Amino acid sequence: MNVARSGLGVAAVNGKIYAIGGITVPSVLDVNAISGLPVSSEPQLVGTNEEYDPSTNTWSFKTQMPIPRADFATAVFQNKIYCIGGVTDSATVSVNEVYDPENDNWVTKASMPASEEGLQADVLNGKIYVMGGSSNYVYNPTTDNWTTMPPLPNILSGLLSSCVLDNEIYVVSSQSTQIFNPENNSWTIGSQPPASMAQPIAVATSGIEAPARIYVFDESSLEVYDPQTNSWIVGSTLPTVLTNPGPDVGRVVSDHESYGVVVLNDIIYVIGGETVTVSTEYVNSTFYPENVSELAMNLKYIPFGYGTIPPEISIVFPTNETSSSNNILLNFVINKPVSWIGYSLDGQQNVTLTGNSTIANMPNGLHSITVYANDTYGNFGASKTIAFTVETPGIETSSTIEVFATIAVSIAVVCVVASLLIYRKKCKRLIL
């Protein structure tokens, strides 16, 4: 980024990534400040808003957030970014500000019922679910109002993180994995994460370019959850520095914290954060000064199995019904960009397509059609085969034509035989 920050909000809209707000000024803290010792410098909260374009690998500034803050929840609904709650220079807030990337402007919406920071926000079925504070809320962007949602079955201590996968919300913490189904307003419990998490950040890959998984980042560690098997594995760690020159000279530990994580086209981006350096002057000293430096990093993580998922193809029309037209519309939907599309009618050779089309002059009768596609990674996908019937008045099926032809031939044979019999009788009379 242009501006190094931690505690920021990140979101992806229309192929771009937005990094909003956060803390910018490095601070030198004293762990004994809790006892009343002074802090040498205070972090500065900003409303900085930057847009990242992965196609050009460049950042550009956009209109700033009206109320500078950090540790707020972000959610994307109808291509707009909702920034909810958080902490300002003076207090924790309930503010709900919405950024429109298309028009590069901000509007203020109804505030959350309570002031909270360190929240998680997820969009599902047209509503925004906000969790992680003393209460959990549901926000309806259409009506601009808030309601309270059912509490988590397991009350959690510490921070939690959440994300959406397959129309369910997964809430992950050190203690548990909890899954919310909005269809029946119920919770279920998943497998517990394998490691303790101090600051978990969860995101999900969709299953379009990479297998559907939940990735939970915590400082420099990464845990991966498979909802199909309800199991966890350890993923690749983030770049970090850990040195220990010896007990007689103290220790220096550097780590990444308070970064933002976002998924775009099933690629994960880890943005911003801070490096924490802790040093001790003497062994077992009670004085631990802590140096914090904000980061502008932008790490790109390619999930396991990326580029191995075939395209999904759904035929919208024709359906498994009877058509009264012999011009059949072929409409279909493919879930990702592809390099080739084709269809097979009645098991015949594939016909290349560029998109939805019309198959003209279909004869009456039963038919079947399948649509195929190759994605840009060479993965081959096929739709379900659709069987349909054409019944158009005035256009006969091939079987009907065959019957008529057989009848016509039979009539012709009968006529010929009758003619021969009549001719024969006439000849006999002439002879007599």
Image (cartoon, rainbow, N blue to C red):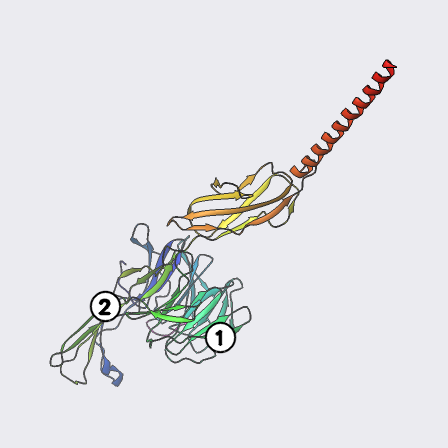
Residue 80 at what x, y percent from top left?
A: 44, 58
Residue shown at the point (38%, 48%) measured from the top left? 376
Q: Earlier in the sequence, mark 1 or mark 2?
A: 1
Q: Which residue is mark 1?
A: 188
Q: Secondary structure at mark 2?
A: loop
Residue shown at the point (44%, 70%) measured from the top left? 170
Give the crowd class for mark 1: few <14, some 14-19, many >=20 residues within 10 Å. few
Residue furthest to the left in view is 248
Disc 1 residue type (three-letter):
Thr
Is 135 above or below relative to 415? below
Q: Secondary structure at mark 1?
A: strand
Q: Quadrant of residue 162?
A: bottom left
Q: Depth check: 322 or 280 in front?
A: 322
Prevailing SS of the magenta stretch? loop
Q: Which residue is mark 2?
A: 240
Residue 419 at what x, y percent from top left?
A: 79, 22
Q: Depth check: 310 or 296 in front?
A: 310
In front: label 1 or label 2: 1
Q: Which residues are magenta?
A: 89-93
Q: Is residue 4 left or right of residue 168?
A: left
> How many labels, in total?
2
Quadrant of image for the C terminus? top right
Does the stretch in magenta take in 303?
no
Residue shown at the point (11%, 79%) measured from the top left? 249
Quadrant of image for the N terminus? bottom left
